[in-house]
Amino acid sequence: MIRAQRLVFCLMGILISGAALGQSGTGSPPVIPNTVSAINSAAPMSQRVVAYNIDAKYDAKTHSLDANETLVYHNLTGQPLDTFPFHLYLNGFQPNATWVRETKRDGTRDVSFEKWESNEFGADEIKSFEVVGQGDFTSRLQFVQPDDGNKDDRSVVQVHLDKPIPPDGFVEFNIKFHDQFPETLERTGWKHDFLLAGQWFPKVGVWWHGAWNCHQFHGATEFFADFGVYDVKVTVPQNEVVGGSGIEVSSVNNPDGTKTVTYHGDDIHDFAWTASPHYKIYNDTFQGSMGPVALRIMMQPAHWDQAERHARILKNTLDRFERWYGPYPYKTLTLVDPDVDSAAEGMEYPTFITGGTRWWVTGGLYFPEGVIEHEFGHQYWYGMVATNEFEDAWMDEGINSYTEVKVLGSILGPKTSVLNQWGVTAGDGEIQRLGYIAVADVDPIARNGWEYANYNSYGGVTYGKTAVVLLTLEGVIGEDTMQKAMHTYFMRYRFTHPTKEDFLKTIEEASGKDLRWYFNQAVYGTQVLDFAVMKAESVPADWYKEGSKEKKGETEYNTEVQIQRKGDFVFPVDVEVKFDNGEKVREHWNAQDRWVRYAYQKKAKVESVEIDPDHRIHIDRNNFNNSHTVEANTAPARKLVHYWTFICQFFAQALAWWLV
Amino acid sequence: MTGQTNLISAGASIAGRNKRYVIWFYLLNLALASLGTGAFSAQAHSIFDHSLYADKLLHGFDAAVYVEMLARPEFGPIQASNAPAMMFAVLFFLLTMLFLPGVLLSYSSDHRVPRDEFYRTCGRNVWRFVRLFLFFAIIAGPVAGILFGVQSALAKAADKNSYEKLPFFVQCACMAIIFLVMTAIRAWFDLAETDVVVSDQGAVRKSVAFGFRNMRRNLGRLLGSYVVIAIVAVAILAVGISLWEMIVPASSVLGAFIISQAILLLLLATRFWQRAAAVAFYVKQQAEIPVIEMPPFAPLSMPELPVAQPGSGT
């Protein structure tokens, strides 16, 4: 019965979609279709603001394309709109563009500009721009630079209409554009005969909090868009294997040696696609709570033996997200294994992600799993909970890094989720923490993505700090409560654009606690947390008596323990004092002062002191000084020194081997 | 093939008879490395010895904790621990150069070389070995530079191909060729060093020429021997590290020390084995130099001199 209902809805959706496609340019009023063919839902899941219809022809030799785009925009802002900004992000790959300036200044994940190469040039050029019913506006387009005033930046263009679009009204734009893809510097472009087409079409900004929100293309951060429907036709040479967001509707060979592949996406806010003659396809299915999800894994031939490994981590990740946070409603998920030199690894677009592996990756090196999990996580924290990545990057990358720690830990083990090879281990939580402690006091989490001190700070704070801040918060409110809060947040804000306060208030609501003391320091502040054991000492109570001998279990000792809060971050903490008779004493310190002293009189000496013995705090900058053993244990240092000695001896022998 | 086998076994025999040198050089290697790791040791002990957190490195090896230690300000800059290790590695190379002549003399002798002769040989050949090293640097440096340059260019070209494994295979092929060429040069100079010591050759250029001539004429035999011994060295390293991982518990500091030092001792032995093979080749070559038959000396006809009669003198 349910199936029959879905079938009827799907047929209706396809008919409406067809009507929408057919009405373009016919004079009939534009609408946003209510199609559901790409989702496992009988009704649209988002408030659809946009409908894109793009017909693109790709020239694989010149790495360029020409396209016609029709955009229907539904004015749900509650006020008349006469100005519309559009992203033209491929223009960011030009020598004086803001993306290149920021990247050259601050560095980014794959790029260091020593010199400008002509094949790195990218462009998104509007050939014609028509507003249906108002005429041609091509000559009236105006580049704007809302973030940095860089007049050479052409990544945002704006059009001012003659007639405003009334509240609840529709407007249709017909845009012809030409793309020149760059040889990938990052995110998008070509390498060898591989192409990843992301940020490739003129895309309208988001009306948010009473104003247009349409940022320039930055070295860090690039996503914020409205939900809607995408119908995209891509024409490529017939030898190309193509994948894209949404579902593949058809693939038709053309007489000229090309083929046209058609995609349709519902309730998504972006569209990306890829093409390469070399992909090998691995298909699988995940049985989701809303229906089956077709997994299409596009592997490089050299990685074919890892296809099953890719599918396994993808399905395990989907399973955790569905159980912990909420359902995945889309019918497809495409995982692309990009060309290894493409700098397009680890990217996220709706229902379409890129992984990243190497042919030599062994079973205990889990970076392919890490990338795939992380990029899939974006389907939730970006894809559905569509936060403003430019202004709240932590709500996208950071929350995703936190769930990455949880999901990978659940699948691969918390201590081994990054590396478990040759006796060497590393867990994702620790790796996130390393990223954080390197830049702990440089920037707050709550900051515009392009305003961080540098790319390292952006990465360390947005990804690492957010992850450890949320892990520590889990220690404050409890793991179950945190999971409940995350589930509530997802279900409440999916297919919307929540703010940072929406997230923080949801956690407070779920936990029933006022957590402002924590958020003010961890999210809005740059305070650093660092506890240390200042002193742990036992002195015989009768120390002043001459000739007295100490006897274990009989001699009475005065023990003093002092704990210091070295950083400015105030955080209540437990302290465990262990005595040499096995007795353990737990203290709780509110940490309001800079230090605290605990004194004991017992027939036992202090053996060790440990701050945060349950290891709930992940934001402490220095874990080494959180404990102190009275007796030195030299074994760990000796072990390391042996390793280092081995390396030095080996190096010296190698030098002598070849030189004499 | 028979000759090659003989060279390997002859080298093993010589090195085995003189294994005390391997032990000495190993102890020197260990002592210098221990000095070189002094700074690292002090830094690691200061951070770890009283912290429970360090247990993550004892019962296993948590890479994140190790990185965190390196990042601590109190650990200091990494160069502070790397620089002494580098310096003591260079010192090991210099001391090897200093004492190697005595070793080569012992290898070429059929009797145990007395200590004073050993040191006298070392002293007599210091400057000669320095000059030999300079010759080596002048020849091997540019050759290595060119080969690595070609490797880099080929790898760059291979990188343009979409077949991901191609650059790796190109690099591997280039590395194999570089290894063979550099090993041949090493064998050449090992012969030259042997000639300098055994024939007490002051003009090292003549020994370099001697080494080159013999290397060229016996390339397959010498290079084959060196490569086989090098493969043994690689096998020792691979098997040793595998055993280290498999049988030594993570928390066994002593176990790790013993197996790691056994690996290094055996690695050092393989290099001495190569040198012994070169000496065996040299000795055999010298023994095979044909003895030219000389005609018997004709008795000299000496004019008879008047013999002074006793008591006839002045």
Image: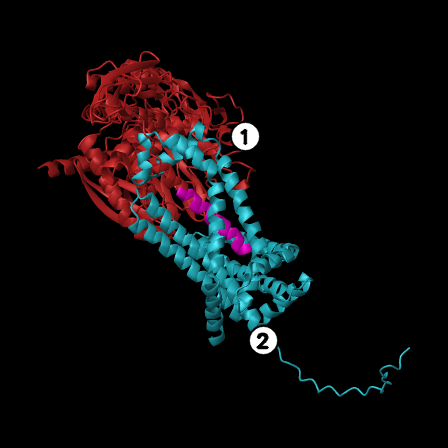
Query: Which one is nearer the viewer's eye here, A465 or B243?
Result: B243
As for residue A225 lying within the magenta part, the answer is no
Residue A593 position, x and y percent, is: 33, 11
The magenta region covers: A642-660
Q: For marks 2 and 1, give the CA distance.
A: 76 Å
Residue A553 left/right relative to A25: left
Image mark 1: chain: A
As for residue A655 lying within the magenta part, the answer is yes
For label 2, the crowd category at 10 Å Cα-Cα, with few meaning under 14, some 14 to 19 and many 20 or more, is few
Chain coloured red: which letter?
A: A
* Display coloring: by chain
Amino acid carrying mark 2 in the image: Ala
Q: Which mark is residue A224?
A: none
Query: Residue tagged by mark 1?
Result: A96
Query: Which one is nearer the viewer's eye here, A582 or A602?
Result: A602
Q: Which mark is residue B287?
A: 2
Residue at (32%, 25%) from the top-left corner? A626
For label 1, the crowd category at 10 Å Cα-Cα, with few meaning under 14, some 14 to 19 and many 20 or more, is some
Residue at (52%, 43%) from the top-left corner? B86
Residue B151 in view of the camera: no
Q: Is residue B234 shown above or below A406?
A: below
**SS class of the residue under badge 2?**
helix
Residue A441 position, x and y percent, is: 41, 21
**SS class of the residue under badge 1?**
loop
Amino acid carrying mark 1 in the image: Asn
Query: Which one is nearer the viewer's eye here, A627 or A499?
Result: A627
Residue B312 left/right relative to A539: right
Q: Colour of chain B?
A: cyan
